[in-house]
Image (cartoon, rainbow, N blue to C red):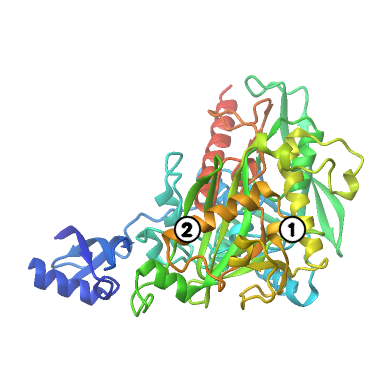
């Protein structure tokens, strides 16, 4: 017999199966053979911290090995092929779903595989430079592979998020992600999960091509196979990296799922120049705020002892309105570290990530300001900061990119043209003064004292300042000289939306092209991008099935 119960326990009881079984026996009169946690969340709103649990108690029987039916991926080596551009969560989950639907995915990824990519990341600190094709944004796994692996999403209307988590578990992630309210794989474990997904794709006859960059779309102007579309994408032109140079050109044919991620600015520029409908999209820009993890634990758990023996490193989620724009925490990384997330030259960008145990000495979060499309003109430079575009008129569709590039270049200049990051004590930022010294930090390339309050646009700096003051009043100890403001956080989401039909998920005017995931402006994070990847795969299969019956 199986009983499902809702419990509210102290932390020392909630994270140990024997303790849960003892509680059920002593308080509920249930002698369970085994207990499986279905849902777990921490309630730290009051001084006494509780853990809310939904558990299944197995009485007189053993629990099943897993609570979901594993997916079987069959051989598709002789099936019609679909081109998937990008091997981030959108692309990988699109590829796996294509295999389920009897189609052969051809995945092209401009960066390296996840292991080789890790070596390039390790070189950023000693060399103080970023490989423009293999970095925290580009490479197998996408921006999420080395930026924490958080799987929490509020976007549950567009697809089955539980299915996404189950596929992660099937490829080696901890089953705990199925029950935790804020599931998290961890930067140290996620690469192995990604490798396992790639192995599934290859075992089933799909293809994965690394260091292969899409440089153009193959468009058939005479195609009439797609309803309401005068043109149809029939494949991609791709260049292969050979001996450190992009040289070998290939044409890969099939419908195209475009899942290039939020930092593929060359793709956006190509689409704009090719007359493929895109539009500027609102985004958020700010800083990384780093505190000692022990201090955040003490604040969030209302105790000088912090997290104690049983509780995990504390998270926070902050949001407010300042002068009509949202200011909020983003990608909070408890017990984690700040990383250099630039994807090209003349850029300094920061992000955060955590290992699976979240056991680091610092906790950090992006603190960002909402920027709407109508705001960009007020804080944009008068011309592009790109050397190649210094005499090219600005395109309104790329306004968000220009803004990101200008601020990232300012940050790079402040950092003496290296990957050191400009930084300021939190109290100095709020009070408008340069920091004479900086607190220790997890940011490996190093920090350089800089007046962020002065050179950041007042549109951003002023709102951050007011939000910090507010949260300092709400959370005693949060506004402190021990915290460090680090610049700059610009890669919160895509600055561009590639327009697509809401029903078919194809581009609004060009058939055979399926803009996908965060880079296309339709997702925000690992899980929502994965869900969108699956939806795009289903849309491709539906189109191909419809055409085969015409």
- The reply, left or right, for residue 347 in relation to residue 42 is right
Q: Residue furthest right?
A: 391
Q: Which residue is more in the foreground, 476 or 70?
A: 476
Element type at mark 1: loop
Name which quarter of the figure residue 323 lies in: top right
Give the position of the N terminus as an image quadrant. Answer: bottom left
- The reply, left or right, for residue 119 in relation to residue 338 is right
Give neighbour class at mark 1: few <14, some 14-19, many 20+ (Cα, 10 Å).
many
* Residue 3, horizontal then vertical, whole percent: 16, 59
* Residue 102, horizontal then vertical, whole percent: 54, 43
Q: CA distance from mark 2 to mark 1?
A: 32 Å
Give neighbour class at mark 2: few <14, some 14-19, many 20+ (Cα, 10 Å).
some
Answer yes or no: is residue 85 visible.
no
Q: Residue at x 42, y 43 (%)?
A: 156
Q: Which mark is residue 426?
A: none
Q: Which residue is more in the foreground, 13 or 221?
A: 13
* Residue 163, horizontal then vertical, whole percent: 42, 50
For the residues carrying marks 2 and 1, which lies nearer the camera in this image? Answer: 2
Disc 1 designates what residue? Answer: 343
Establish if 108 lies above or below 57: above
Name which quarter of the figure residue 109 lies in: bottom right
Element type at mark 2: helix
Name which quarter of the figure residue 347 lies in: bottom right
Disc 2 designates what residue? Answer: 471
- The reply, left or right, for residue 52 in relation to residue 368 is left
């Amino acid at each position: 017999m199986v009983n499902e119960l809702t419990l509210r326990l102290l932390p020392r009881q909630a994270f140990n199966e024997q303790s849960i079984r003892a509680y059920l026996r002593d308080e509920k009169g249930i002698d369970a053979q085994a207990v499986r946690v279905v849902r777990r969340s921490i309630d730290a709103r009051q001084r006494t911290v509780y853990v809310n649990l939904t558990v299944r108690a197995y009485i007189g029987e053993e629990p099943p090995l897993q609570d979901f039916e594993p997916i079987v991926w069959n051989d598709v080596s002789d099936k019609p092929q679909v081109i998937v551009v990008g091997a981030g969560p959108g692309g990988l989950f699109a590829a796996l779903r294509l295999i389920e639907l009897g189609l052969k995915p051809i995945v092209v990824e401009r960066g390296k595989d996840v292991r080789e990519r890790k070596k390039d990341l390790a070189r950023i600190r000693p060399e103080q430079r970023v490989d423009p094709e293999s970095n925290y944004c580009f490479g197998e796994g996408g921006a999420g592979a080395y930026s924490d692996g958080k799987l929490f999403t509020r976007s549950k209307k567009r697809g089955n998020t539980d299915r996404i988590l189950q596929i992660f578990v099937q490829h080696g992630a901890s089953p705990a992600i199925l029950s935790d309210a804020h599931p998290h794989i961890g930067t140290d474990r996620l690469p192995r999960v990604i490798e396992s997904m790639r192995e599934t794709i290859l075992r089933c006859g799909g293809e994965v091509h690394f260091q292969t960059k899409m440089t153009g779309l193959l468009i058939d102007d005479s195609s009439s196979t797609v309803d309401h579309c005068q043109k149809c994408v029939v494949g991609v032109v791709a260049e292969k990296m050979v001996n450190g140079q992009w040289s070998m050109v290939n044409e890969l044919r099939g419908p195209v799922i475009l899942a290039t991620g939020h930092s593929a600015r060359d793709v956006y520029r190509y689409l704009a120049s090719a007359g493929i409908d895109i539009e500027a999209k609102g985004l958020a820009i700010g800083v990384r705020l780093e505190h000692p993890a022990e201090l955040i634990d003490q604040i969030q758990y209302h105790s000088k002892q912090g997290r104690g023996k049983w509780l995990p490193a504390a998270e926070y989620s902050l949001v407010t309105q300042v002068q009509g724009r949202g200011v909020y925490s983003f990608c909070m990384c408890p017990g984690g570290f700040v990383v250099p997330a630039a994807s090209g030259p003349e850029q300094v960008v920061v992000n955060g990530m955590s290992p699976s145990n979240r056991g680091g000495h610092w906790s950090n979060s992006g603190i960002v300001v909402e920027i709407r499309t109508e705001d960009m003109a007020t804080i944009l430079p008068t011309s592009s900061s790109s050397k190649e575009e210094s005499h090219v008129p600005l395109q309104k569709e790329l306004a968000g990119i220009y803004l990101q590039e200008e601020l990232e270049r300012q940050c790079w200049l402040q950092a003496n043209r290296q990957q050191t990051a400009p930084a300021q004590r939190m109290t100095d930022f709020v009070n408008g003064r340069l920091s004479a010294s900086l607190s220790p930090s997890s940011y490996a390339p190093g920090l350089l004292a800089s007046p962020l309050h002065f050179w950041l646009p007042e549109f951003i700096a002023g709102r951050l300042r007011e939000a910090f003051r507010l949260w300092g009043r709400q959370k005693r100890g949060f506004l402190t000289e021990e915290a460090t403001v680090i610049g700059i956080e610009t890669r919160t989401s895509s600055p561009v939306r590639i327009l697509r039909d809401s029903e078919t998920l194809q581009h609004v005017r060009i058939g055979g092209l399926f803009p996908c995931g965060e880079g296309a402006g339709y997702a925000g994070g690992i899980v929502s991008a994965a869900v969108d990847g699956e939806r795009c795969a289903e849309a491709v299969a539906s189109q191909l099935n419809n055409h085969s019956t015409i």
